[in-house]
Amino acid sequence: MKLINVGFGNIVSGARVIAIVSPDSAPIKRIVQEAKERGMVIDATCGRRTRSVIVTDSDHIILSAIQTETIAGRAEQSGEDGDKDE
């Protein structure tokens, strides 16, 4: 199982991640707002500014205070580590 550290001790299953995007665009802000209304947002920012939005296959939206590029790099590393174990 691939696990991705999204900051502050929070970990997400890499197999469930569909996209890691920046929260700056209007469509992403709309997606986050709609998910909040449905109760599908997981806030992993620990009170800090949201710097990335993670979309999962279960329609959950995870907010993180870590940069999008950093999380993507961690996802790639966990993917490489997972391949070595198999």
Image (tube, rainbow, N blue to C red):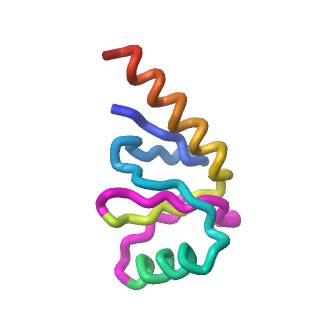
Residue 9 in picture, x, y percent from top left:
55, 44
Q: Is residue 45 visible?
A: no
Q: Residue at x 40, y 15 (%)?
A: 84
Is 76 above or below relative to 50?
above
67 relative to 63 in the view: left or right: right
Q: How many callouts does the rendering have?
A: 0
Q: Which residues are magenta?
A: 38-58
Q: Quadrant of residue 25?
A: bottom right
Seen in the picture, residue 37 relative to 81 is either above or below; the reply is below
**Residue 72, image x and y in percent?**
57, 43
Judge whether residue 29 is colored magenta: no
Nearest to the observer: residue 19 or residue 85: 19
Q: Is residue 64 above or below residue 78?
A: below
In the rendered view of the protein, which quadrant contains the N terminus? top left
- Say which quadrant the C terminus sits in: top left
At a point 51% along the width and 38% down the height, the residue shown is: 75
Residue at 40% x, 50% y: name it: 17
Q: Is residue 57 visible?
A: yes
Query: Could you tell me which residue is drawn at 29 percent across and 61 percent down?
Result: 58
Residue 71 on image: x %, y %: 59, 44
In the visual, does 70 lie left or right of 38? Answer: right
